[in-house]
Amino acid sequence: MILFDFELERPDTAADAVALLGRLRGDARLLAGGTDLMPNMRAELVKPGVLVSLGAIAPEAPATLPDGSLRVDAFSRLADLERSGVVHARAPMLAESARAVGGNQVREMGTLGGNLCQESRCLYFNQRHDYQFAARCYKLGGERCYPFPTNKRDTCWSVYMSDVAPALVALGADVEILSEAGGRRIPVEELFTGSGLAPLALDGAELIRAAIVPAPAPRTGWAFHKSTVRGGLEFGMAVIAVTLALADDGKTCAGARIAVGAVRERPVRASAAERVLAGAVPEDARLAEAAAAAAKEVNPLPHHGFTKRYLMDNIRVHLRRTLARALERARGARG
Amino acid sequence: MLDVTKSGLGSEARTRARLVSLCVNGEWHEVAVKPRVTLVEAIRDAIGLTGTKASCECGTCGACTVLVDGRPVLACITLAVECDGRQVRTVEGLADGEKLSALQEAFLDQGGLQCGFCTPGMLMSATALLERSPRPSREEINKALEGNLCRCTGYNAIVDAVLQASGQGVKPVMK
């Protein structure tokens, strides 16, 4: 049982849901799969007066748009994306990243939009420690940061652990945001503030309605890697998503998109590493150079017992291997 | 027994219980619950089926797994009101009277349980898997059961039991 009382509304349409959110202003939270919100409510990290459930709204099936891009309903369950033939054909990295999330039941319950809107995590914030009640941390409006006591009030090093977000960033996807004023479409990267205190740049009365993944350029390869301790039912230590396109000659790299997740307050683009690759012939040494640049540039936060130094090594090694896999796929991809 | 219709908040309580219809193992039940009551509490405390276990109660261990409209879900982080009108299957629904399901028999035969606390959740996750994929590979079984923690068996006997139940060359131990 959740230890405090709240009301629950089940609107029939997404438009009704945002209207409700607008009316309840701040006291309401959206409930999709609940796999992030419910544990957080149990620990009383959030105490909404009203939950606006999206449970009565059936998601639309993933569909290809006239321009070749793939539109995925944000209310889709992760397990359905993992199993969707259309998603496998048009955006296989999205399916693979969905398969990397949590455990089986979490994927059966959790939605794409909910995964993107998950709360950031820290070894202390997410624990129901006594001291979170006695004296709460900055993120809960308190007076100190327990894991990093020298951090100032405006600095929270909780990390954003979505597995799907880095994949969408690397795929160059957009998200459709719905509010009472109507819909707007922004690149998925603009969804994040970069602050651990409030990681999402969404207004309280907005919701993510869909993700739109553009059709890949010709000769594009992708690869995804999630570092974990036990290989299932856990958050990543570092999540790496890469797309890499080859030029017409099939040898030179036309461009790459590299995103690293679970190591900062937001999924991070490794732009310097992308510049190392663009226009170059991606030989092993070049991939290694790009991976080393990315590790430095991403500048991972120590989290969940992993030191910054370890995470830099992790990113350097696994990004190099992930790039090599993406390159292999790009060579095999249709021109 | 916990009276799920009463809130601990006394007169301050703002919310009222609402009637929720759940079809549990083919039998319809109407329960009066507040929004904050979880599905596992409704099943155990209001309906009285205590086969489903509540363990971590924060969606980590999978002991509370039940099938809602065929999907394995974590009943400890699912609100009962969200399941109004849905088909719920619990471990009590697997056996036909005294006759255990093939999967339950295989768990018994392989020794796929010791303390048994994770077993109802394991059985429901494995049942969902076998309904979707009647002859799963070892890798598929591992993936389907990754959300169910067992601290006794070391998992091998459980995976063998699922292989045995799906008729995939694992020899019965006891027969």
Image (tube, rainbow, N blue to C red):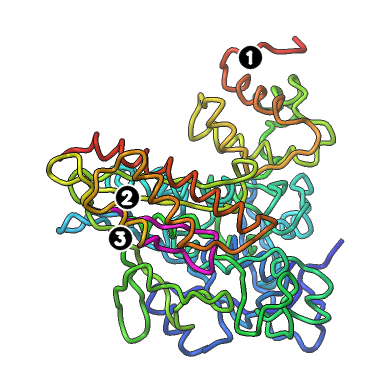
In the drawing, what numbered circle is on residue A172? Answer: 3
Sequence-wise, which precedes: disc 2 or disc 3?
A: 3
Q: Residues within 10 Å of mark 2 (few under 14, many from 20)?
A: many
Q: Chain of mark 1?
A: B
Residue under pointer 1: B170
Is A266 colored magenta in this rendering? yes
Which residue lies at the image location 37% right of the left edge and 78% below the top edge?
A15
- Farthest residue to the left: give it: A248
SS assignment at label 2? strand
Q: Are marks 2 and 3 on the same chain?
A: yes
Tags 1 and 3 touching, CB below 8 Å: no
Q: CA distance from mark 1 to mark 3?
A: 46 Å
Q: Is residue A310 left or right of residue B173?
A: left
Mark 1 vs mark 3: in front: 3
Residue under pointer 2: A243
Which residue lies at the image location 30% right of the left edge and 37% below the top edge?
A329
Q: Residues within 10 Å of mark 3 (few under 14, many from 20)?
A: some
Quarter the N terminus of chain A occupies: bottom right
Q: Position of residue A167 (x, y in %)?
A: 40, 54
Q: Is residue B168 above or below residue A150?
A: above
Q: CA distance from mark 2 to mark 1?
A: 42 Å
Residue range in magenta is: A256-271
Which residue lies at the image location 52% right of the left edge and 74% below the top edge?
A199
Q: Amino acid at mark 2?
A: Thr
